[in-house]
Amino acid sequence: MLISDILKSAKTIAIVGLSNKPDRPSNEVATYLQGKGYRIIPVNPNIEEVLGEKAYPDISSIPKDISVDIVDIFRKSEDVLPHVKEAIEKGRVKVIWMQEGIVNEEAEKLARAHGIEVIMDACMMKSHKLGY
């Protein structure tokens, strides 16, 4: 699936590691995506709310009635696998997106084995701006 197709079809993006600090890349990307009409679901155990959305401590805590299209991960490469496992358990997640500098081939293989598209080492905001 092309990145442009992924971005056009997605409506809800869970952002793992979303910070409530405006100067952090995760916050900048989330603010941009929210401004483009995507619903942002913050996933961070250290905050209660950001960008007007309730934050959840992990993907498993996101209510079942919220359908997540993309799980966008802002975590160290070695910390990605548990989030991918949670996304698989949640079900209906179409894409795992690992931001720039984040590569985890084991997580990629697991996600693909469960029919989930994977984008690694790419910024969703930059991809959107470039029209990919």
Image (cartoon, rainbow, N blue to C red):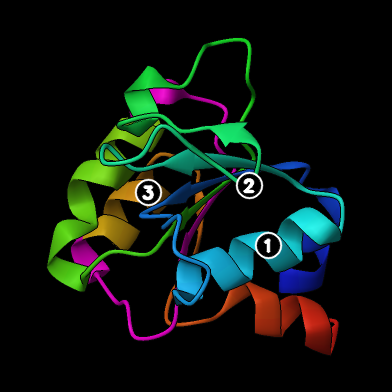
Marks 3/1: CA–CA distance: 26 Å
> Is the N terminus in the top left, top right, bottom left or bottom right quadrant?
bottom right
Q: Earlier in the sequence, mark 3 or mark 1?
A: 1
The answer to whether residue 1 is seen in the rendering is no
> Is the C terminus in the top left, top right, bottom left or bottom right quadrant?
bottom right
Picture quarter containing residue 35? bottom right
Residue at which label 1 appears: 31
- Taking 61 as reference, is 106 left or right? left
Residue at x 75% of width, y 54% of height: 34
Q: Are marks 2 and 1 in contact (CB under 8 Å)?
A: yes
- Looking at the image, is 83 positioned above or below residue 78? above
Residue type highlighted by circle 3: Ala
Asked if the magenta segment contains residue 94, the reply would be yes
Picture quarter containing residue 21? bottom left
The residue segment tinted magenta is 89-106
Q: Earlier in the sequence, mark 2 or mark 1?
A: 1
Q: Earlier in the sequence, mark 3 or mark 2?
A: 2
- Looking at the image, is 17 positioned above or below residue 104? above
Residue type highlighted by circle 1: Thr
- Name the front one of labels 3 and 2: 2
Residue at x 34% of width, y 43% of height: 44
Q: Position of residue 97 (x, y in %)?
A: 49, 62
State the residue in front, 58 or 89: 58
Local SS, label 2: loop
The answer to whether residue 81 is seen in the rendering is yes
Point out which mark residue 41 bears.
none
Point out which mark residue 111 bears.
3
